[in-house]
Image (cartoon, coloured by chain):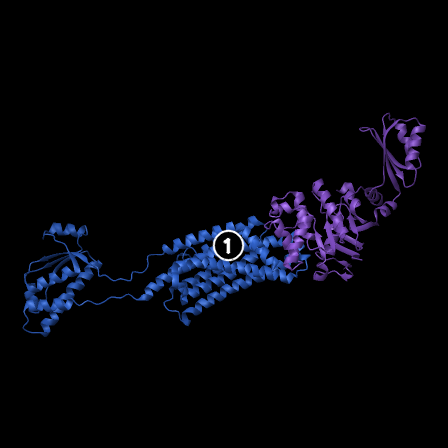
Chain colours: A purple, B blue
Amino acid sequence: MIIKVNNLVKRYDELIALDHFNLEVREGEIFGLLGPNGSGKTTAINCILSLLKYDKGTIEIYGRPMAPDAYDIKRNIGIIMQNVAVFDELTVYENIDYFCGMYIFDKQRRRELVEEAIEFVELDSFRKFLPKKLSGGLLRRLNIACGIAHRPKLIILDEPTVAVDPQSRRKILEGIRKLNEEGATIVYTSHYMEEVEEICTRIAIMDKGKVIASGTKDELKGMINSGEKLTVEILEFNPNILEGVGSLPSIVSVDYNENNNMLVAKSRRGKNNLSALLEYLRNNQINVGRIYSEPPTLNDVFLEITGKELRDHV
Amino acid sequence: MQVYKALFKVIEKNLPQIIIYLIVFIGVAVGLSNAGGNPADMNFTATKVSIAFINYDKSALAEGLENYLSKNTNMIDIPDDNEKLQDALFFREIEYIIRVPKGFGENLMMGKAVELEKTAIPGSVSEVYLDNIINKYINTANIYISNMEGLSDKQLADFVEKDLEQKAEVRLNRKIEEVSRSQKVGIHFNYMAYSLFAVLILGVSTVMLVFQDKDLKNRNLCSPMTIRSMNTQLILGNLTYAVLAWLIMTLPGFFMFGSFMLTAKGMLFLLNSLIFSLTALSISFLVSILVKGPGAVSAAANVISLGTSFISGSMVPQELLGNTVLTIGSFTPNYWYVKSNNAIAGMADVTLKNIMPIFYNMLIVIGFAIASLAIALVVSKQKRIG
């Protein structure tokens, strides 16, 4: 186990930021910590990194207790924080060299690692640029390079794609996958469920300082009653259709959008839900246009467990 | 030494602003030092007063007096017309009128009291000076008359003339020159207090603000570099910066005052300014913990450096400041630093007795450094806990 957190409690006066928070991260995985803003993701990361004192609980990294002076543990960790943390006065190269130099003392080795990091985040043309001359996306890539240049075994990324354009986001996600393939264990926090769903091998969903569910994508989706979302284009709509579809045993809820003529039905977990719906429509001689079937998302998981949309909080 | 190197890169990026302060300092310091009065005049030349000499006695002694006065005064030829003489006196063409009455030489030879008619500007220095010169001639003549019998008036006039040709060599004490130079150096070092303060607050606060940035600080804290190592490098970096700033600011002194800077007094000035630099560094560190952003750094650098310099005598001499201002000023290290500079400048000799009060002042300045550092550490810890 790379990270093991047991019953972590962190209070800010009356506010409980972490409420008996538990976490286990295994070697070689990309572990996603998903939750709406304010759910306690960053607080949890700061406690794990010993940047914040906590009131109760234990944190172990590589099987040893994590503490502010656990320098041997810190040597193997790379962090990429939510806010870009670089020196405005130093160039791209100097920034990466500075942070790499905190871990690697051999100059020749450091030079090689800095070059590799620059290449990895594709900032070669910008090596002599000051950070203020970089766009938001490039700045995020510099932030990542500063965190990974020393080739850490464990990389913690706290919302690294906030306010990043789609192209840079794509590069960042590809980079994370590549780092994982090269052997690094990744802890990735985000409130973007698509990103977490795309790259993470295991996921913990957080709300109000607690892990409310954890597992692989499929395990999480298997925890809920909802099945796929069925969307059918109906050009000649009448309210009886809603009533009829809603009465089908495999359907949990149904709605119709008059703007795009789409009927959206949420099915129960089970097989042949789409067939049952189509059969009903055919039997009632209702003409249909386009048909989509989408598997349940992490948002559905969050919705079913907490009763609220994950997106509502974004 | 990552932190140490990064610190200087941060300072390097803020160098233009710091250089402006240095250029202003060097410009003003050179100007102030040269405006501190001309160097002490080390040559002596007797002054010559313009007089009118009207002689009604044709004796050898009267002619001898005229001859003697012509060597020690500027004789202006004005006819014996009362109105013309009064006009010349009024317009200061002459400052003294002397009339030698008939029988002057004869009366002098006979040992009688002689009277010369004089008109002078009342209470003037020239009146006293001329009275002295004339009395000197008559008194010398009287000495010969009293002690040598049978002298003719021609012989007497020759003896007196020969005696009065003897001149005393006047040499001014070198100490006067030294004190004058010391005062100039004192002005230079007094003004340095302002620039040192400004440059140190600007540099140290800018650097500390960068390293205290929450995100950067967190990233540094996640690294395996110990907090002790990070702090040591920061302290070492700031100390290097302070010493460099001090060295650069003392250099103009070496150019302007040359070998004086290598004398005991020059060394005292240097020691005093070095101690002040370290105190300014300590205060800058405290300021860096209290200020919130780059704008506040600039404001703090100006307000603190200018404010303390004005009330402590760095710019206006302490003798010209009121007691209340000086009392307030004594709560700043600048006051004691300037006091030491003034004491060094006014010292005729470097003796233990003379330098002890200066060392006490230096101790007070060091006290300010320790107090500021202690407050900075307490505030810093409080902030960290908070």
Screen quadrant of the C terminus of chain B: bottom right
The image quadrant of residue B135 is: bottom left
* A156 w.r.t. B161: above or below: above
Can the viewer see residue B335 in this picture? Answer: yes
Screen quadrant of the N terminus of chain B: bottom right
Counting every numbered tag in the picture gives 1
Residue drawn at x 72%, y 40% is A166
Q: Position of residue B62 (x, y in %)?
A: 8, 62
Can the viewer see residue B318 in this picture? Answer: no
Q: Which residue is mark 1?
A: B199
Q: Looking at this view, is A47 or A85 the one in front?
A: A85
Q: Residue furthest top?
A: A236
Report the chain holding disc 1.
B
Name the kind of residue labelled 1 in the image. Answer: Val
The image quadrant of residue B105 is: bottom left
Residue drawn at x 52%, y 56% is B200
Q: Position of residue B50 (x, y in %)?
A: 17, 56
Q: Position of residue A22 (x, y in %)?
A: 80, 55
Secondary structure at badge 1 equals helix
Q: Position of residue A162 (x, y in %)?
A: 71, 44
**Pointer 1 local density, CA inside 10 Å: few below 14, some 14–19, many at least 20:** many
Q: Looking at this view, is A5 or B8 the one in front?
A: B8
